[in-house]
Image (cartoon, rainbow, N blue to C red):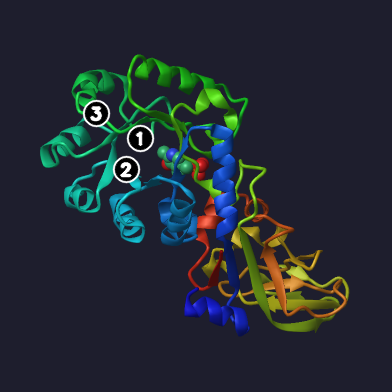
Amino acid sequence: MTPRATLAKTVPMSTATLTIDLNAIVANWRALARLARVETAAVVKADAYGLDAAKVGNRLATAGARQFFVAVAEEGIALRRALGAGPRISVFSGHMAGDAEKIAGAGLVPMINSVDQMLRHVEALPGHPFGLQLNTGMNRLGLDPAEWSELHDIALAQNPTLIMSHLACSDAPDHPMNAQQRKTFDEMTQGIDVPRSLAATGGTLLGRDYHYDMVRPGVGLYGGLPFVDAHPVLTLDIPVIQVRTVPVGETVGYANSWTAQRPSRIATICAGYADGLIRAMGPKATLTHEDKKVPVVGRVSMDLITVDVTDLETDPATLQLIGMHQSVDTVAAFAGTIGYEILTGLGNRYARIWRD
Ligand SMILES: *Cc1c(COP(=O)(O)O)cnc(C)c1O
């Protein structure tokens, strides 16, 4: 445990406390692996969705994960430093200009996305492992069918580690795009004896037809939708700075957007949009105290949020935004966004505690 985490446990913090349950992440990884019954990699891009790729990666490696995915080579270098030799670290953005030394130095596996990347890779690092990413309809990354037929023989002659593609609509099980992409993936990889992967979290939940040889969940590990049965990973407890009585007719916060309709107890808590609690969530958001919900009133500001605690019996010392009673996705819904965006946006002002 870091000194900072020890401090946060024993001394009340003025900043909010974000607790990350590493055992829940492991339990989620195991649950997805049990569903898939094939190699289950872990996607730890964007610093493990904001939860610390080194800590998450190490814990999952100890639990048996052997393959990790990051977005860019720089993340791969940091992860390699944390994990040491052994686990495979693959890079979704492939082999970008200037990446050769990073890829070679950290032993990364680029997922080649274009003919240009393929040429760059074989020129700079002949014999160095690589995978291939195919475009099956999302039109974001990967080789198009025409490029793929051009490259197919040369690429396969060099034993790629993996052939992968990505689903655009896997969080909607009934969307016809899922079957369409699967069909395209089958056609593009027919008769090829290389491990294949199509599924992220959503695809893992779509069932056996989508698992191929490897699944690569990200958000499900961190307790987010579409993995509805995930173990909750996060709690976010925010200290109350002060509580005041606001008389009927007075307003709270910027732009006077809320007016007291009854004599109200208003708690001002120590977090705001600079901490990733985005301003758009304001009017719909609630926090919890024990098992009671209390509403946000007025605008979310940079460092502060005001909450109507009139209905609580006593003034609270802290309020909880994420935890047992409200998930990351609940909070995302307040703001009209997705759990991924809330997770990756959680700021660096929190006292973070990794529970293990
Ligand atoms: C981010 C990403 C994943 C993981 O997606 P989740 O929805 O978080 O499980 C898998 N594959 C690719 C290509 C990605 O970009």
Q: What's the mark number on residue 159?
A: 3
Left or right position of 182 against 102: right
Residue 171 picture quarter: top right
Residue 128 horizontal/vertical position (percent):
19, 39
Element type at mark 3: loop
Q: Is residue 299 above or below residue 147?
A: below
- State the residue at coordinates (56%, 21%): 176
> Does the residue at mark 2 contact the one at mark 1 (Cβ under 8 Å)?
yes
Disc 2 to disc 1, C-alpha distance: 8 Å
* Residue identifier under label 1: 141
Closer to the camera in the image, 280 or 322: 322
Label 1 CB-ligand 1 distance < 8 A = yes
Q: Amino acid at mark 1?
A: Leu
Disc tally is 3
Q: Residues within 10 Å of mark 2 (few under 14, many from 20)?
A: some
Residue at figure coordinates x 17%, y 51% from the top left: 101
